[in-house]
Amino acid sequence: MLTKRIIACLDVDAGRVVKGVQFENLRDAGDPAELAKAHSLSGADEIVLLDISAAHQERTTLLETVRRAAAQLFVPFTVGGGIRTLEDAAAVFAAGADKISINSAALADPTLITRIAGRFGSQAVVVAIDAKRVNAKRIDAQHGENGMQWEAFTRGGRTPAGRDALAWAREAESRGAGEILLTSMDRDGTAAGFDCDLTQAIADAVRIPVIASGGAGGAEHFVDVFRDGHADAALAASIFHYGLTSLGDLKQRLGSRGIPVRWPC
Amino acid sequence: MIAIVDYGAGNLVSVKKAIDWLGYQCAITSNPAQVAKAAKIILPGVGHFASTAALASSGLRDAISAAIANRVPFLGICVGMQWMCDGSQESPETTGLGLLPGQCERFPEAVKSPHVGWNDLEVSASSVLFRGVPAMPFVYFTHSFRVPATAMTVAYCEYGGKFSAAVERDHVFGVQFHPEKSGEIGLKVLENFCSL
């Protein structure tokens, strides 16, 4: 049976992990390559590395980090952050990434999705959508479902993009995106649970997989987003804060609740 | 030397990286002469079946056919395995190698497509590729078309019905999943091929 994926996410600044899945018994908790490898061995189905470096000159550092991490990683590896052009994407793939994640650049120029997919395949293109619940009057009423609407934001969630998140997800799919990485701005950092309404609305609107992100505070939240939110995958950031000791622990809990997971792996 | 055939479709870094990790000599090549000399051939592939048309126009198809006839071990991965069929519904005008009868087909409407993620396999005990792999192994898939069950199928996967996750006969192998992205199990499958 196709399993629900648990994806470990590492936020990296200037070549160091600044936020990510916490881990015990690690020699260097800040080294992205070490962490990525440790997560994959402990049961992460996939690794996402998000570069949050503000300075453009950190690109060389990022590519070196990707290269080091990829060399010992044999599960799917996605890299996002700061990818603005086909050439940026090509450099990240050459360094060993399997997929790239694009957000602001795709909103600014949606043809970027098609161009990267045309060269590297749709399976390699993840479109990240940062969505926030909005007053229905703010955007085109035809896209609302059950009276709820979400708007896509850019620049790390700071700037409203003026796009309905549902319509944008559909457009991203039609332009060649292989997956949607959906972050709820309302839930991110709250530990109040994933936004299952948002996740379900997007997951039911597209045929491509949807990765839920933002708000996990416990194993039950993962159960909810897989069962009610119809998510295909969920992003785990600070797993240690969920009262769990490891990704394996999370997977065992999900398995015992009837969610198909890759465990043991 | 193991030749990893480059026909301009997608990213071959991951496959090379896995073979390097296992300690076997390999090279990414688009040169038919180098493919003809290879001790083993891996044909990866992502994206659209139509991209395999480049194999015929570049002379790589003839080099691969001749090598297979000379009993050189061959492994097709993902679209590389699909190309072993007569053809695919994805691109009816593109001809496959014809080692596997029939056409690659779409998933039924009842399931989401593409099929992305880790799914488990039902493996034949006699399989060479899966030698030493535990029962019901999980492997990573990402594809929109699939190879139906054939007489060469050695591993089945269930997603909107059973399909061929791996095929083998003598020195010819194909896997629909990505062994280079399937953790320890994937590495074992690659090792089983590389050590032939």
Image (cartoon, rainbow, N blue to C red):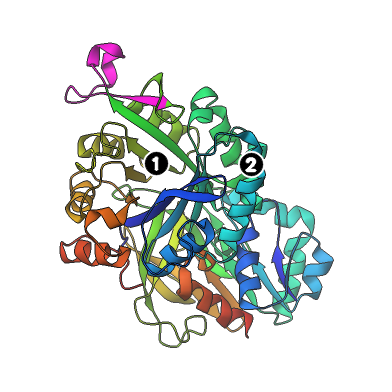
* Mark 1 neighbour class, 10 Å CA radius: few under 14, some 14 to 19, many 20 or more: many
Report the residue marked by disc 2: A59
Stretch in magenta: A134-153
B166 is higher (above) or lower (below) than A228? below
Tag 2 secondary structure: helix
Spatial CA span between label 2 and label 1: 22 Å
Chain under disc 1: A
- Residue A98, position as x, y percentages in the image: 55, 53
Q: Nearer the viewer, residue A44 or A98?
A: A44
Front-most of A233 and B126? Answer: A233
Q: Which residue matches tag 1?
A: A181
Side (left or right) of B50 relative to A263? right
Residue A6 in the figure: left or right of residue B31: left
> Alpha-carbon neighbours of circle 2 within 10 Å: few (<14), some, or many (≥20)?
many
Residue A72 colored magenta?
no
Q: Is residue A4 left or right of residue A218?
A: right
Look at label 1 and name its amino acid: Leu
Amino acid on which the number 2 mark rests in the picture: Arg
